[in-house]
Image (tube, rainbow, N blue to C red):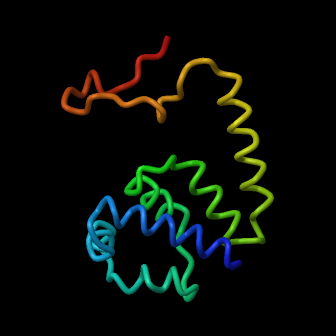
Amino acid sequence: MSTVAKMRFEELVDAAKRNKGSKGEIAKEFGFQQSRIGDWIAKRRKPEAAEIAILAEMAGWPILETVAEIEMELNDKYKDIWKKAMTEWRAQRDSNPRPLPSEVDFPSSNPVLSRPILI
């Protein structure tokens, strides 16, 4: 993992920590020991894509873009496929004038209103 990737991943963890209060709270939501987060940062262990997605959500960062960017930085072997996926996703997003469901906040108190309405 490059220094840039480490800094980027650390920024993600820091942003999630700011929103959750501590690394301990982050670990509690995941259901594992706080030491795993330290292992990620120290490069002793690589987070799964789903774990990166959850951290992005905790941080308030765009999930898909964050996962792709972090995966490109952490794993050279699959960098090209993540880059291709993001290029295709951005092209689709940019060609669609309506916001994607993930880009719209829906009220969650009413299950009917919490679903996007497709036109």
Residue 110 falls in which quadrant of the image? top left
The residue positioned 41% from the left and 56% from the top of the image is 59
Does 64 appear above or below 40? above
- The image shows residue 109 at horizontal and vertical percentages of 19, 31
- The image shows residue 87 at horizontal and vertical percentages of 75, 43
Task: Identify which residue, 65 or 22, lies in the foreground.
Answer: 22
- The image shows residue 41 at horizontal and vertical percentages of 52, 81
Does 71 appear above or below 61? below
Task: Identify which residue, 110 or 6, lies in the foreground.
Answer: 6
Please state, as top left, top right, bottom left or bottom right, where the N terminus lies in the image.
bottom right
Residue 17 falls in which quadrant of the image? bottom left
Give the left or right position of residue 53, taking residue 116 as reference.
right
Residue with the most extreme top position? 119
The residue positioned 67% from the left and 72% from the top of the image is 4
Does 94 appear above or below 66? above
Q: How many numbered discs?
A: 0
The residue positioned 37% from the left and 31% from the top of the image is 105
Residue with the most extreme left position? 109
Give the left or right position of residue 38, taking residue 67 as reference.
left
Give the left or right position of residue 25, taking residue 48 as reference.
left
Does 66 appear above or below 4? above
The residue positioned 32% from the left and 59% from the top of the image is 19
